[in-house]
Every structure is written in C-alpha cells, then in structure tokens.
Image (cartoon, grey):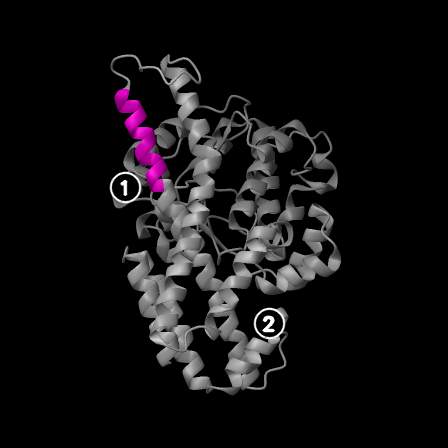
Amino acid sequence: MAVWDDVVGQDRVTAQLAAAARDADALVTAGSAGQAAAAGAPQEPGAERGGAGQMTHAWLFTGPPGSGRATAARAFAAALQCVSPDRALGGGPGCGFCDGCHTTLVGTHADVEIVRTDLLSIGVKETRELVRRASLSPAGGRWQVIVLEDADRLTEGAGNVLLKAVEEPAPRTVWLLCAPSIEDVLPTIRSRCRHLSLRTPPVEAVAEVLVRRDGIEPEAAGRAARATQGHIDRARRLATDERARARRAAVLKLPLRVDDIGGCLKAAQELIDAAGEDAKQVAEEVDAKETEELRAALGAAAGTGGRLPRGTAGAMKELQDRQKRRATRTQRDSLDLALVDLTGFYRDVLAVQLGATVPLANDEVRDSVQRIAGASTPERTLRRIEAVIACREALERNVAPLLAVEAMTAALRAG
C-alpha cells in the first residue's frame, strides 16, 4: 500500500506531492550539497519555485475539516523519508512498507516531528523548541521534517518565532503546515510556503476507505459517510463508536424541542452537559495516567500519593493547567461537532423545501426533517442555519458556551 492511499479524493494534490517527493529523492540521491541547499532556500514572498514537482522547504496544506490535510502532510513526510530500493523503478518514493515510510506513519521516525495540540493555542515556548529541532541535521541523512498539524492555533508571538525559521531554513529541513484556510496563517508565513488546497472528499470515496482500511460493512460505511458529508475522521468515529451515534441522535432531536422558551433553555443545557461529559471522559482516560507518570518522573513512588520532592510543585502545577486547557478545548470541540450536525439537519430541511434531489445527510430522521420543512419556509430555515453559524462564531470568540447556545436555541424557535 502506497502512503498516498489514505489521502482520499485528492488526486491533484497527491500528484503534486508525489512529483515533489521524486524531486526531493533525486536531490538526496545525487548527494550534491549545492542542490540540497537550493531545495532549502527560501522563496521570494508570493513566489512559487519551479513547476508542480519542484521541491521546496515549506508547504501549507489547507482544506475544510475532514479533508485530510494532516493525512496528506504525513503521507508527504513519509515519502520524503522513503528508503525503498524500488523507488526509482517507476513508483517513486512513498512505498508505505519500508522502514522510512513505516516509522514516519506511526510517529517514531527520528527525523520527523509531528506536532498536534489538544489545547486552544500553541505558544512561543513550544514553537521555539520546534525551531531548535528544525535546525538539526537529519540523523538519517535525508530530510528533517516538521509537520505542524494545527498551524492556525499559533499565537501571534509563536507565529513570529516560526517566521524566522521559515525565512532562513536549515539545509534539508522541510516545514509542513496545516490549517483550515490560508487566512488562518500569518501572511508573512504563507507567502513563503507552497500552498496546496484540499477539498472535501466525495462521500463515495470516504465510504470506500472505511470499508477497505477499517473493515466497516459497506452499508454502515455509506451511512456514516453521508451523515458526515465527507469528513473522514468523523465518519470513522460514527461508524465505530456507539456513544458517538447516540450523541448525534440526541442532537438531531433538538429542532423538535424548541417550541417554547423552556424547551430552548433545557435543550441548550443538555448540549452543554453532553460536551462536558466528553471532556470528563477524556480526562478520566488521560489525566490520571499523565499525573502518575509525572509523579514517578519527579521521584514520588507510584500510587503512594506521597509528598513530591522540593522544587517540583511548579511542574505539577503546569501539568494541571495544561489538563484544564485541554478539557476546555475538548468541550468546545464536542460542542462544535454538535453544531455541525445541527447545521446538516437544517441543510436537509432546506433541500426538502426547495425540492432538491440530493440525498439527505440525515436520512434516518427523514420524518423529522419533513415535519420541520412543512411547518416553515426556506427563509426561516436559512435564518436558523445562520443562528447555528453565529453560535459557532461566538464560541470562537470565547463567549460563555451556555449563553451562546441559549441564544442559538431561542433563535431557532423564533426563526
């Protein structure tokens, strides 16, 4: 299986990446210091060096949630590290089986740093450590690759730290940045990257990969792919996690429960509570293990609850603060996921009202969709969709979640 097989529905992008990987392999194989340095030279702002296959030192992958931008970046990183002896025989680098490909994909390659955050932002401290890592020569002699999956979460200060590393890259260092859109990255950084825009994968392609890779029954795979409208990770979770299906089913009942103010407030509180349960579940799975591991590393005996050595309280406080920030991020992500499902419901309502022939994303609640469609107008449905979008934007601005959701459910009733 080639590393590109899991980059679903992105033929144009994978063709460019495969060509660049061949170009990069030629530079390494040739062993020319001049050529390698050229590959690492920064671009002029706004310029794109060479043709579609030209290797460069910094890449920006953008695309809507579920498009697989991080998957594409990891696949490219694996292709850059491919050491298959057959890569020059027509298939090019990226075999998926050699030590370079395998260790990159599982996250253990010495020269590949994959950075993702479960917090709300990436700060200056973490970014400086990445820049330090990027300055090192590759241990394996090929490329030092930094995959930053959440480049949109860099603070302004962190972005400025990263900028200098992208402007003056070390030889044989490649930055792979991922963000939802090009506007989510500082203009000074994005102007020094080659931009690759990914699209939402076709529902059929997502269903096919769920069957092939995850062993999901075709009917269940198709249902999950339609429900998530091509979001690969959400489709996998929906097809394999009973709790995810139960939470989604509860969200899809909300439009029928906002007939009065009492119903609006109750529905809002239940959405917040469900998101809080998700955060609590993550905390139960991760926090205790992290805390015990840190206590052991600081010299406290495992499971004793004994006093920590003097001078280590700061490290424990830092971990607790990180866990609180992660819980906030988890709650917001869970809530946002519910709002996406709600938007999909009203999208189906609008399709029915307009007589569109597109398949319903939420066919399992067709009766509810038709009931809401018959009791309102397309104009009211659009206002309801706008209310859900406004709630998502309010949460991004750190509005208190309960207030934002209560305002949304009230607007759904009035709409």
SS under mark 1: helix
Residue 411 position in % (x across, y down): 34, 75
Residue for badge 1: 160
51 to 172, vertically: above or below: below
Q: Is residue 132 left or right of residue 254?
A: left
Whether residue 234 appears in this view of the structure is no
Quick one: 77 or 232, which is closer to the camera?
232
Pick the quarter of the image with the N terminus: top right
Residue 365: numbered disc: 2
Residue placed at 43% from the left, 43% from the top? 280
Question: What is the magenta range?
Answer: 313-325
Q: Earlier in the sequence, mark 1 or mark 2?
A: 1
Amino acid, disc 1? Asn
Residue placed at 42% from the left, 79% from the top? 382
Q: Main secondary structure of the magenta part?
A: helix
Q: Name which quarter of the figure residue 258 lies in.
A: bottom left
Q: Is residue 323 left or right of residue 225?
A: left
67 to 388, vertically: above or below: above
Q: Name which quarter of the figure residue 358 lies in.
A: bottom right
